[in-house]
Image: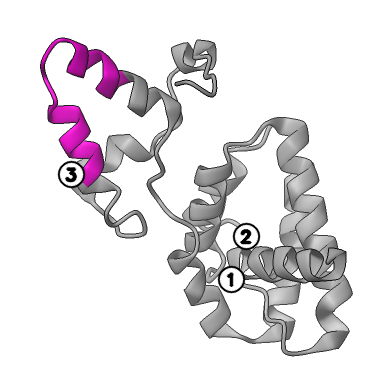
């Protein structure tokens, strides 16, 4: 059971990172890249959704200074640590040469997720009889992987007040 879970977890994170799993020699490198990124994200409390989506756009870029890479780097405080990881990741992507895996990242890393602050705003409006925000969220989340320019604000970092939201099982 533990082996099946680990294999599934690894497969999912490889897909999120655009890492090919056809060459068993690369398994250790894939795992090291996954674990170091997840650890860095945890240490810095990096926004999970934003990181994966921005990384989906950056991974196909071969220049570390590209604007898409800068957008990923902006999510980290310790940019030196991120850049070291980025160098290893980019070198591994070049080595694996699997453009399909990289392009597939956009189909596994959603741009839009149902965040607590979005739900809170919808609840507050609904309490006042305005259910438009519920309808907007319903429409938006039917295509969470699609670019939807009219809903761009829904993909931003949560506002500072959102850190005060408490959720219970009865919410």
**Labelled pair 3, 2 in contact (Cβ < 8 Å):** no
Camera-nearest label, 3 or 1:
3
Query: Residue at 52% of width from left, 19% of height from top?
Result: 167
Say which of 142 and 66 sits in front. 142
Q: Which mark is residue 62?
A: 1
Distance between the alpha carbons at the discs numbered 1 and 2: 6 Å
**Pointer 2: what residue?**
64
Please provide the residue range marked out in magenta: 121-138
Q: Is residue 152 left or right of residue 72?
A: left
Say which of 153 and 144 sits in front. 144
Q: Is residue 79 visible?
A: no
Say which of 12 and 55 sits in front. 12
On the image, the x and y values in percent for residue 39 come to: 80, 44
Q: Is residue 122 magenta?
A: yes
Q: Judge the density around disc 1: few (<14), some (14-19), many (≥20) Cα neighbours within 10 Å.
A: few
On the image, the x and y values in percent for residue 105 come to: 51, 68
**Pointer 3: what residue?**
150
Q: Secondary structure at mark 3?
A: helix
* Sequence-wise first label, 3 or 2: 2
On the image, the x and y values in percent for residue 128 come to: 15, 10
Q: Is residue 25 visible?
A: yes
Q: Looking at the image, which residue sits at the far front?
A: 170
Mainly helix, strand or loop, the magenta region? helix
Query: Residue at 43% of width from left, 20% of height from top?
Result: 159
**Labelled pair 3, 1 in contact (Cβ < 8 Å):** no
């Amino acid at each position: 059971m533990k082996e099946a879970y680990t294999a599934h977890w690894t497969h999912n994170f490889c897909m999120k990172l655009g890492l090919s799993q056809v060459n068993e020699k690369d398994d250790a490198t894939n795992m090291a890249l996954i674990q170091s990124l997840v650890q860095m994200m945890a240490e810095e409390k990096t926004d999970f959704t934003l990181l994966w989506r921005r990384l989906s756009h950056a991974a196909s870029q071969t220049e570390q200074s590209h604007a898409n890479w800068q957008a990923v780097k902006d999510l980290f405080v310790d940019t030196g640590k991120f850049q070291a990881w980025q160098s290893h990741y980019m070198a591994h992507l070049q080595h694996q040469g699997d453009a399909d895996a990289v392009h597939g990242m956009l189909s596994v890393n959603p741009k839009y997720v149902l965040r607590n602050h979005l739900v809170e705003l919808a609840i507050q409006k609904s309490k006042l009889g305005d259910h438009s925000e519920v309808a907007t969220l319903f429409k938006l989340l039917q295509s969470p992987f699609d670019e939807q320019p009219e809903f761009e604000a829904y993909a931003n970092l949560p506002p500072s007040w959102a850190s005060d939201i408490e959720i219970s099982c009865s919410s």
